[in-house]
């Protein structure tokens, strides 16, 4: 059994600043909710969902392999490869959006979003760079920079969202605040690199180096990137399908997004635990006994126990939370929060364990699994969109998502047990 004291120390290093920022973010939610209409929140969150969807493949998926090589030179080559791919794909996307962006977005019934598409290439390139740096810094235990970056991101985004509302910028202010928040996230990484606290990069490369990376880690862009894209698409489906089937979709999405913001506050701990879990699991993957399985099982039990407290409270008191504390015009978000609490609670446990797919290199099987999950969720939303009300659709989406999350947890633990 591995010693978990160092794991806990790393978790709390990442958690300390991020938790403070999330508390501040939660306290600012009533102000932001009072300053912006649900439709404005819905439009900005639809754009952000689009960024998160396409950002999955912006680095070619190579950032997922960052933790696995034993040699530093290989990790650096992976970083370079991912950076060059993101610049190439970002350029192609920018040119495509310049020519066809408005028509594509209008075909998805996102009328207001059609005015925001020029932001996409910049936001995607920035998110791609942050993904590469986050994994590279995690590899070298530079966790404080990651934590400070998340703090600056949350505080900058929320603070500027409030400020821009006084200039009557509507959803444009929310999008610009998101962009500047990402810039704030980048600053600690640049500071650490400027101080040369990481191994210096050898930016010289040969084609043979990239050929070797593709030979050894080519399954990540071929299968891993597609798997995560499908998984992300399944999570973001409401932002793309609700406008197709429901009237006043922007207002509905605003309430849905506001509920996700509240439910996402405890979810931050799961992402942090996942970062550390991946780092430790990648090392245990080379052991010949069941260390990885016992470590994974213990992690899942701890996460389940932790998840019970916040998500039970949100399930029981979501309506009261919005009625007495958060913005009253987001009352529908209180109902959505209660309905989605089981889904987010199961996701809390599933997120760290998903890294076992990368560790065990079962990316092809995970691609098939995520494709199946996407088909199930899409079919559900299409059927419910035609015969159910909006509230019922979200409730059924939560039920199905919860069941699929538990199926994924069981599959990941099964992978950990296999040598």
Image (tube, rainbow, N blue to C red):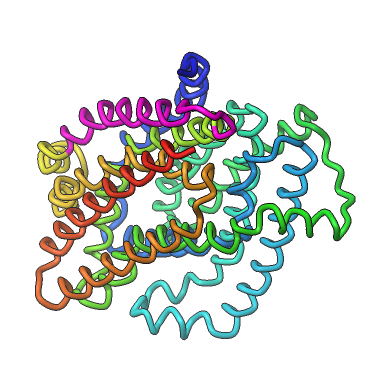
Q: Is residue 230 left or right of residue 237?
A: right
What residue is drawn where x is 19% and y is 44%? 342
What residue is drawn where x is 63% and y is 40%? 68
Q: Is residue 6 visible from the viewing direction of this image?
A: yes
The answer to whether residue 311 is above or below residue 5 is below
Q: Is residue 265 magenta?
A: no
**Residue 355 at what x, y percent from top left?**
48, 42
Q: Is residue 305 magenta?
A: yes
Q: Which residues are magenta?
A: 285-314
Q: Is residue 61 left or right of residue 150?
A: right
Q: Is residue 171 visible from the viewing direction of this image?
A: no
**Residue 107 at what x, y percent from top left?**
39, 84
Nearer the observer, 7 or 195:
7
Marks counted in the figure total 0
**Residue 320 at what x, y percent from top left?**
10, 39
Quarter holding the N terminus is top left
Image quarter of residue 138 = top right
**Residue 104 at what x, y percent from top left?**
46, 82
What residue is drawn where x is 40% and y is 51%? 166
Nearer the observer, 364 or 388:
364
The answer to whether residue 205 is above or below residue 352 is below
What residue is drawn where x is 48% and y is 70%? 116
The secondary structure that most of the magenta stretch takes on is helix
Nearer the observer, 115 or 407:
407
The answer to whether residue 183 is above or below residue 248 is above
């Amino acid at each position: 059994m591995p010693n978990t004291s160092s794991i806990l120390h790393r978790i709390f290093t990442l958690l300390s600043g991020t938790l403070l920022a999330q508390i501040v973010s939660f306290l600012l939610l009533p102000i932001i909710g009072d300053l912006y209409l649900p439709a404005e929140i819905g439009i900005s969150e639809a754009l952000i969902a689009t960024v998160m969807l396409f950002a999955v493949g912006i680095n070619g998926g190579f950032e997922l392999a960052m933790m696995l090589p034993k040699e530093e030179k290989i990790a650096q080559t992976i970083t370079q490869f991912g950076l060059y791919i993101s610049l190439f794909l970002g350029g192609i996307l920018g040119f495509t959006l310049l020519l066809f962006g408005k028509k594509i977005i209008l075909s998805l019934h996102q009328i207001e979003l059609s005015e925001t598409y020029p932001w996409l290439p910049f936001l995607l390139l920035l998110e791609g760079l942050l993904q590469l740096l986050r994994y590279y810094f995690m590899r070298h235990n530079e966790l404080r920079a990651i934590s400070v970056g998340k703090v600056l991101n949350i505080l900058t985004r929320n603070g500027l969202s409030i400020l821009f509302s006084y200039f009557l910028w509507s959803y444009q202010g929310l999008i610009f605040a998101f962009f500047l928040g990402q810039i704030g996230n980048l600053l600690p990484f640049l500071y650490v690199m400027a101080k040369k606290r990481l191994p210096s990069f050898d930016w010289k490369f040969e084609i043979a180096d990239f050929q070797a990376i593709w030979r050894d880690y080519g399954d990540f862009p071929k299968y891993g990137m597609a798997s995560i894209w499908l998984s992300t698409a399944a999570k973001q489906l409401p932002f793309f399908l609700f406008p197709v089937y429901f009237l006043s979709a922007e207002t509905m999405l605003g309430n849905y997004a506001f509920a996700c913001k509240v439910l996402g506050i405890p979810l931050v701990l799961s992402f942090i635990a996942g970062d550390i879990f991946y780092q430790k699991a990648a090392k245990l993957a080379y052991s010949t006994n069941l260390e990885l399985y016992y470590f994974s099982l213990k992690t899942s039990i701890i996460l389940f126990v932790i998840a019970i407290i916040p998500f039970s409270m949100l399930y029981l008191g979501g309506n009261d939370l919005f009625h007495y504390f958060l913005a009253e015009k987001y009352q529908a978000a209180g109902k959505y929060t209660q309905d989605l609490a089981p889904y987010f609670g199961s996701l809390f446990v599933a997120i760290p364990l998903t890294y076992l797919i990368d560790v065990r290199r079962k990316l092809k099987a995970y691609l098939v699994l995520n494709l199946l999950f996407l088909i199930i969720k899409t079919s559900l939303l299409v059927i419910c969109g035609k015969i159910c009300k909006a509230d019922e659709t979200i409730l059924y989406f939560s039920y199905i998502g919860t069941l699929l999350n538990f199926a994924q947890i069981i599959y990941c633990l099964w992978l950990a047990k296999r040598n």
